[in-house]
């Protein structure tokens, strides 16, 4: 199953069109995705047989698949290739930080570049369904509603300006958390732990990797994070990126006004970000 946020309303994606959840369920679920996640188990059971009139999806109306999460969690240094490229040792537990909710957007956006060096990080993003505290590893996927495409855009100067890197602020400028276009449940994938991710800058491939290279896979992330945090319906978890970021190029490459960044994950869809100069 795929879900979409169409003009703020929850929709099931059927053959490329949208089935409005509130209308089809007689207002039992929805109208927004926040309330759908809060009733995830009941909604999932209903959705298996859902039917009704569908409408074409206008991509300009798509919002974030989880627009108002209580928590936005991110994991760094989580791909073996990326860690090796950066010259680090693999962490023994997930490196966790946060992005702030205000940076989250939908899939097709224009982003104003702040001062500094803005980099890209294509990521698989988890959206919590049932959630919980101290979730067993073998129930990690069961605690999720599904996954979506994300970019963890990062301003590297402010991130690395101090002895202890300041991840959260540098990764939370307006528009620095695009997500979408859809949420896909685990059964949309032949193997949900081996998903292809690609990122193109102005038509040039910059990242091309698979989630089977994760140091901590999806179930491990859910398990480890929930040891200390209660995960709530709709929470968002960025799972990390692999090699190909601009900071590690020789010489480094950063986003410029006029650039177009296209991020795709198999079976989910594509994000498109265009970048403009700060006119202030």
Image: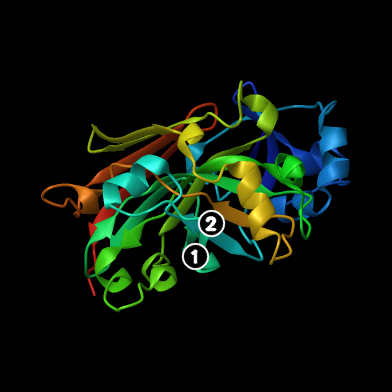
Question: Above or below — where is 57 with respect to 279?
Answer: above
Q: Are marks 1 and 2 in contact (CB under 8 Å)?
A: no
Q: How far across and down, in percent of the image, does residue 265 sit?
A: 47, 33
Q: Quadrant of residue 260?
A: top left
Q: How far across and down, in percent of the image, does residue 121 sit?
A: 37, 49
Is label 1 or label 2 in front?
2
Residue 94's mark? 2
> Label 1 vs label 2: CA separation?
16 Å
Question: In screen coordinates, is 204 left or right of 40?
Answer: left
Mark 1 burial class by Cα count in 10 Å: few <14, some 14-19, many 20+: many
Question: In screen coordinates, is 150 left or right of 209?
Answer: right
Compare residues 77 and 37 and report the one nearer the observer. Answer: 77
Residue furthest to the left in view is: 251
Q: Residue at x 51, y 68 (%)?
A: 100
Kindly tell me whether residue 7 is visible in this rendering.
Answer: no
Of pointers 1 and 2, the one earlier in the residue sequence: 2
Q: Residue at x 88, y 42 (%)?
A: 42
Compare residues 204 and 50 and report the one nearer the observer. Answer: 204
Residue corresponding to mark 1: 99
Question: Above or below — where is 220 with respect to 162?
Answer: above
Screen quadrant of the N terminus: top right
Question: In screen coordinates, is 239 left or right of 116?
Answer: right
Q: Under tag 2, what secondary structure?
A: loop
Q: How far across and down, in percent of the image, does residue 84 sit?
A: 32, 45
Q: Quadrant of residue 235?
A: bottom right
Question: Above or below — where is 102 with respect to 28?
Answer: below
Compare residues 164 and 154 and report the one nearer the observer. Answer: 164
């Amino acid at each position: 199953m795929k879900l979409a946020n169409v003009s703020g309303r929850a929709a099931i994606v059927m053959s490329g069109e949208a089935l409005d959840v509130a209308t089809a369920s007689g207002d039992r679920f929805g109208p927004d995705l926040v309330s759908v996640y809060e009733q995830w188990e009941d909604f999932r059971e209903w959705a298996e047989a859902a039917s009704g009139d569908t409408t074409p999806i206008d991509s300009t109306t798509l919002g974030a698949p989880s627009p108002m999460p209580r928590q936005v969690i991110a994991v760094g240094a989580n791909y073996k290739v990326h860690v090796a490229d950066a010259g680090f040792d693999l962490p023994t537990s997930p490196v966790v930080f946060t992005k702030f909710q205000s940076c989250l957007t939908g899939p097709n956006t224009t982003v104003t570049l702040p001062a500094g060096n803005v980099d890209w990080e294509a990521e698989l993003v988890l959206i919590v369904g049932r959630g919980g505290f101290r979730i067993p590893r073998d129930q990690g996927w069961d605690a999720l509603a599904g996954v979506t495409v994300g970019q963890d855009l990062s301003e590297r100067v402010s991130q690395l300006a101090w002895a202890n890197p300041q991840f959260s602020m540098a990764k939370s400028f307006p528009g620095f958390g695009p997500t979408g276009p859809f949420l896909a449940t685990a059964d949309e994938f032949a193997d949900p732990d081996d998903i292809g991710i690609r990122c193109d800058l102005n038509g040039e491939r910059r990242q091309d990797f698979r989630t089977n290279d994760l140091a901590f896979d999806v179930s491990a992330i859910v398990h480890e994070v929930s040891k200390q945090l209660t995960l709530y319906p709709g929470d968002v978890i960025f799972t990390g990126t692999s090699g190909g970021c601009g900071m590690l190029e020789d010489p480094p490459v950063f986003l410029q006004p006029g650039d177009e960044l296209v991020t795709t994950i198999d079976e989910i869809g594509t994000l498109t970000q265009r970048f403009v100069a700060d006119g202030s």
